[in-house]
Amino acid sequence: MSSDVVVVGSGPNGLAAAVLLARAGLRVEVREGAAAPGGGMRSKALFDSEIVHDICSAVHPLAVAGRFFREFDLPTRGVELRQPEIAYGHPLDGGRAGLAYRAFDRTCDALGVDGPRYRKLMRPLVEHSQSTVDALMSGQRSVSLAALRLPARLFTQRLFRTEEAAAMLAGVAAHAGGRLPSLPAAGISLLLGHLAHTTGWPVPRGGSQRIANALVDDLVAHGGLIHSGQMVTDLRELAGFRAVVLDVGPRNLLDLAGSLLPSGYRRRLERYRYGPAAAKVDFLVSEPIPWTNPELRKAGTVHVGGRRAAVYASENATVQGKLSNEPFVLLSEPMVADETRGLPGKRPVWAYCHVPNGDPVDPADLIRRQIERFAPGFTDTVLASRTVNALQQNEYNPNYVGGDISAGALDLWQVVGRPVLAWNPYRTPLRGVYLCSAATPPGPGVHGMGGYYAAKTLLRDEFGIRELPSLAPDKERVQ
Ligand SMILES: Cc1cc2nc3c(=O)[nH]c(=O)nc-3n(C[C@H](O)[C@H](O)[C@H](O)COP(=O)(O)OP(=O)(O)OC[C@H]3O[C@@H](n4cnc5c(N)ncnc54)[C@H](O)[C@@H]3O)c2cc1C
């Protein structure tokens, strides 16, 4: 066997681990079950051979702000991160909307009577953004401690007077895909919410695959290998490697290694819970979405669900296994910031809503109706659509059990004990076997931090390497 370490899965965490290990001087190979590398960062031609569209992730606040990517430095590697003028918007009935401009002062001014409250809440985070991000995205204990310091009013609903401000933060909290309000969702709301005014919510020019390609290029430049179309079905296939990093969730680890695991650890993995699913629809439309509030045409991301109470109601119904008729929809129109994504008269729209785990519903009509409510005439602009229901999401990626794209429920217990309660959650009881996926801290999103922490642990445990290599672009390769 020529490699020291094998990484199973090439999502952002698998590739981040592989990059760090290869830069530390180890011989690394990655085995990816799908036909192309990237996991949740894959893009492909959809509707038209010239329209490259994001299959999973589309908007990347964490691929700029998080520690791994800060150092890896995507822009210097030629990945252009395009910033919409409005990071995210939240339409309300009657043409009103909450608008998170990149400019912090403008956002506060637009919020009227709630401006000073919004400023008071966000300013400390905006001013200390990097330490806020590092605290909220570090190991699980500091996440929970940081979360406990959150202003209680943020998740008891009494912070704001206007619906604009309240709905805005509820929409960001709903990214958690769980019960609302809750402590973990409030933490996510503050993390992503303040990033709107610091490093932004960018979309990569040319699609999310560009991020995956930059990681693969760096891995290969440091001697790593990547094999796509190689689904690993049994951990024993990897017996010849000195160490193994698994970019998979607890359920997948049980499938790969169930009989090899000590019974206590196996039972703890079996208790891991998956949360609501994401059901996605991609539209091809003939013109920009005709939002009633014209400012929303500048927003890269739009949260469609109406008033805060309605967002809470639909998210809570989903957690209880009920399909909401008015689901909360996350929507991105990439051409708002990246004109290369479409053609004249052909614009892609990316949208998903939360549905109960494993629900086979086709979300196209539910999502279309929600958009139509705040953008009358939208339906008439739709040229084509393609849906991925919860079950198809799971077929596409075995980590999304039942369609849960967060790789596990984000309730308080599973924020603290992800995937099990352990001093170091990246280790498994099997010698040389580590977990790095979004089912480890700090959880879902394209940030690579699970991979970073797992690789750091592996380097120390297996190779005695304590000093981490630089992740900065090699000068001679900078584009
Ligand atoms: C529809 C959708 C929208 C999203 N939107 C955003 C967004 O806008 N912004 C954002 O930051 N995040 C978003 N996310 C979440 C983000 O994509 C994930 O949290 C992130 O990709 C998880 O990274 P990961 O490395 O843990 O695993 P993944 O990206 O899931 O990658 C795991 C990889 O491992 C492979 N694999 C699994 N088992 C095996 C095996 N046995 N053998 C070989 N290969 C295997 C899989 O094929 C996959 O390629 C979205 C996800 C989805 C699905």
Image (cartoon, rainbow, N blue to C red):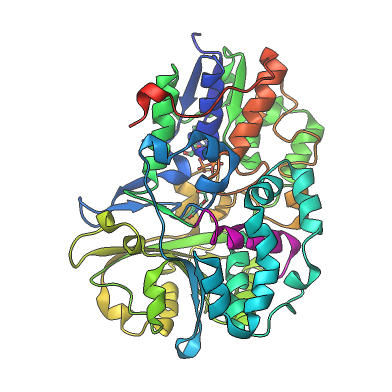
Where residue 31 appears, as percent x and y from the top left, is 47, 27
Q: Decide: is 387 above or below 376.
A: above
Compare residues 270 and 77 and report the one nearer the observer: 77
In which quadrant of the rendered view does residue 281 lie? bottom left
Q: Which image quarter holds the C terminus?
A: top left
Seen from this angle, which residue lies furthest left? 344
In which quadrant of the rendered view does residue 287 lie? bottom left
Q: Is residue 179 visible?
A: no
Where residue 368 appears, as percent x and y from the top left, is 39, 75
Q: Residue at x 48, y 34 (%)?
A: 10
The question of residue 197 being in magenta is answered with yes
Tell me which segment is drawn in magenta. 178-200
Q: Residue at x 41, y 41 (%)?
A: 75
Compare residues 310 and 399 and report the one nearer the observer: 310
Q: Decide: is 382 above or below 419.
A: below
Where residue 77 appears, as percent x and y from the top left, is 39, 35
Where residue 173 appears, as percent x and y from the top left, is 63, 65
Relative horizontal placement of residue 83, taking residue 316 as reference (left or right) = left
Seen from this angle, which residue lies furthest top? 1
The question of residue 370 being in magenta is answered with no
Compare residues 250 and 69 and report the one nearer the observer: 69
- Count of numbered badges drawn on the protein: 0
Q: Residue at x 39, y 28 (%)?
A: 217
Q: Is residue 14 visible?
A: yes
Q: Residue at x 21, y 55 (%)?
A: 48
